[in-house]
Image (spheres, grey):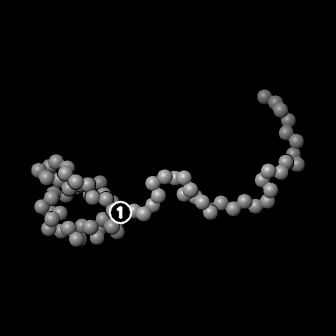
Amino acid sequence: MKTMKVSEFKARCLDVLKHLEADGTELVITRNGRPVCRVIPYRTSADTLFGALAGSVEVCGDILAPLDEVWEEGL
């Protein structure tokens, strides 16, 4: 995470935003050495993982049919 003084950010705002958008990195803006703001690029990804892999798995054949192999119980 990069840091930048508020005066420097004010002078280079448009260039900094373009760079953050391309890189995807975060920026912390400081005043007198203390953080006052965090700038992060906007992302349209989902907040949860539920459904994130929908449509990426293909089932071939019957996955519920019994196997032709006989398993022996043993410890």
Residue 4 is drawn in which quadrant? bottom left
Q: Quadrant of the N terminus?
A: bottom left
Tell me: residue 37, above or below residue 44.
Answer: above
36 relative to 61, above or below: above
The residue located at (22%, 54%) in the rendering is 37
Left or right of 72? Residue 9 is left
| Residue at numbered disc 1 | 42
Q: Residue at x 47, y 58 (%)?
A: 46
Relative to 73, 33 lies left or right? left
Image x and y of residue 54, in percent: 60, 60
Outermost residue, top direction? 75
Name the residue located 42 percent from the left edge and 63 percent from the top edge.
44
Q: Nearer the viewer, residue 1 or 14?
A: 14
Residue drawn at the location 33% of the way across and 62% of the way down: 41
Count of numbered badges drawn on the protein: 1
Q: Quadrant of the C terminus?
A: top right
Q: Percent x, y for residue 5?
A: 15, 57
Q: Position of residue 58 (x, y in %)?
A: 69, 62
> In the rendered image of this protein, does residue 69 appear above or below residue 39?
above
| Label 1 element class | loop
Near mark 1 (Cα within 10 A), the count class, few <14, some 14-19 or many ≥20, is few
Q: Amino acid at mark 1?
A: Tyr
Pick whichever, 25 or 39, lies toward us.
39
Q: Nearer the viewer, residue 19 or 75?
A: 19
- Residue 59 drawn at (x, y percent): 72, 59
